[in-house]
Image: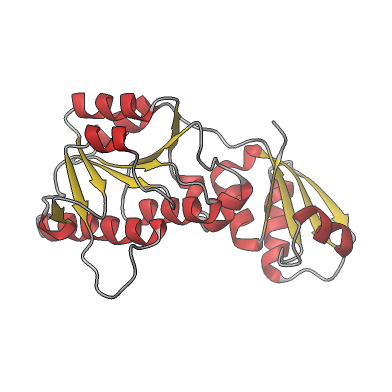
Amino acid sequence: MADEILYGINPIREVLNSRGHKVREIWVGRRGASTALREILNQARGLGIKVRTIDRRRLDLKAGTTSHQGILAFLSPYDYVELEVILKAALGEGAALIVVLDGIEDPQNLGALIRTAYVCGAHGVVVPKDRAAQLTASVAKASAGALEYTKVARVTNLRRALKLLKDQGVWVVGLTMEGDQPIYEIDLCQPIALVIGGEAKGIRPLIKQTCDLQAYIPQQGRLDSLNAAAAGAMALYETMRQRLTAAPQK
């Protein structure tokens, strides 16, 4: 698998902090570096990462954009973890919260959902191996650095993965338009696997059948549904709200 290319000051700073050993090389533009760029380059050199000064036009071509802020990083492919790693971490930290994505194909949506999962306290994200976006530099960029701190498992059979979670006492809640209850009426303080469907068709029928419950997000107006990333953000925020409200005050 080819190296991933990451660009932008904040994403590269995050990757150096969390997994600098995965950065093979950094390219930087010839123009004068800002303070932030100089700090990143000093950190990279301190980690033994090769730094090359490159013409701006070549940076543009390699990044596929002019919005790279004068810096590119070449990374070894992103690492997935086994589902059991996420499950073990989740069960060891109180009520589990695992985000399961059924067929999210847009890298921007995947990155946004990973970001929301991280800031809302999820223990990890599960994605299917086929017919879904995979971890790339575009996803990392969209996650605004959250990918570097989020465990992501890639599974061959999503239904089997959900059954494994259920066997370990995790309650599987699917987010659908035709749900049984609004999301805010469900007790989300218990161990939860929140299933979010793809942009076009939502959760597949067999995955729906595997869910313990289907929840919906109340909405007004004439639109049929929310964007997958927006719907996931609302459900994850509600989960976090319930858990923070229920937590004993120190």
Of 98 and 102, nearer the camera is 102
Q: How is the image coloured?
A: secondary structure
Location of residue 96 in the rendering, given as x and y in whole percent from the top left corner: 23, 40
Q: Residue at x 30, y 37 (%)?
A: 205
The answer to whether residue 36 is above or below residue 1 is: below
Of 46 and 203, nearer the camera is 203
The answer to whether residue 45 is above or below residue 166 is: below
Location of residue 131 in the rendering, given as x and y in whole percent from the top left corner: 51, 37
Residue 124 shows up from this direction: yes
Rendering quarter of residue 98: top left
The answer to whether residue 106 is above or below residue 165 is: below
Q: Residue at x 53, y 51 (%)?
A: 106
Q: Residue at x 33, y 64 (%)?
A: 224
Q: Residue at x 27, y 50 (%)?
A: 175
Location of residue 198 in the rendering, given as x and y in whole percent from the top left corner: 42, 48
Q: How many marks?
A: 0
Residue 92 shows up from this direction: no
Of 29 and 188, nearer the camera is 188
Q: Tell me: 22 left or right of 52.
A: left
Of 120 and 234, nearer the camera is 234
Rendering quarter of residue 151: top left
For the N terminus, the quadrant is top right
For the C terminus, the quadrant is bottom left
